[in-house]
Image: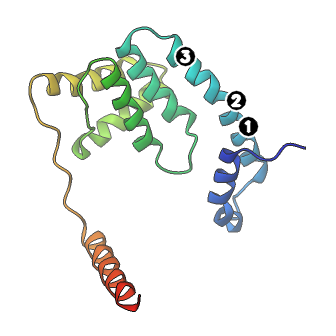
Amino acid sequence: MRSASVQTKFVAAQVVSLRDDPKFDERWLEKQIVAVRDAMPSFFDLLREESHPAVRVVLGHFIFVYIHPYMDGNGRVGSFLMNTMMASGGYPWAVIPVTDRNAYVNALEKASVGEDIVPFADFLAGLVQKRLAGEPLPAVPKASPRRRALKQLNEVTESRTGALS
């Protein structure tokens, strides 16, 4: 009998809290795990076989987010993959500004539901064109009051823990 893959264990650990949800369907989760496990090798094959870096960037980001292998963070990981593919193709690093999040999500939606990848390709091309024109990366948004409070709490906890050692 084979042990569960690391990915399966990771997903299983993330859904423990979902079991309390009356809508939670364990069969759906099992199908998702199998679908992701089957889709990821094809995803990497597609990236290896595509010779044009711009096509790799668009398809790589879109397909990764479409496969949705994680419970959370797919957009962030997809953006990181997009940037590594951009850098390997000679393109500048690009960041999707918070102010453009709706346009990003709408373009992804048109690609997945409307089966039209052109708006998503145009969206990413626009980011690259801005960078090539010398526009700096967008500033990181200021931390919310909640994040500042958590940071302060961590600092206090660390100072107390350090005092005890």
- In the picture, measured across the screen, residue 78 lies left or right of residue 142, that is right
- Residue at 15 percent of width and 26 percent of height: 130
Mark before the other along the chain sequence, 3 or 1: 1
Contact, mark 1 vs mark 2 (Cβ under 8 Å) = yes
Task: Classify 35 as above or below 13.
Answer: above
Badge 2 marks a residue whose secondary structure is helix
Quote the CA–CA distance across marks 3 and 1.
Answer: 19 Å
Please name the residue that numbered disc 1 is placed on: 34
Residue 113 visible in the snapshot: no
Task: Classify 89 as above or below 6.
Answer: above
Residue furthest out toward the front: 165
Residue 158 percent coordinates (x, y): 35, 80
User: What amino acid is found at the position of numbered circle 3 in the picture?
Assistant: Leu
Residue furthest out toward the left: 134
Mark before the other along the chain sequence, 3 or 2: 2
Contact, mark 3 vs mark 2 (Cβ under 8 Å) = no
- Residue 38 has which mark? 2
User: Disc 3 or disc 1, which is closer to the eye?
Assistant: 3
Badge 3 marks a residue whose secondary structure is helix
User: What amino acid is found at the position of numbered circle 1 in the picture?
Assistant: Val
User: Label 1: few (<14), some or many (≥20) within 10 Å?
Assistant: few
Residue furthest out toward the top: 51
- Residue 46 has which mark? 3
- Residue at 41 percent of width and 87 percent of height: 165
Quote the CA–CA distance across marks 1 and 2.
Answer: 6 Å
Residue 152 percent coordinates (x, y): 27, 78
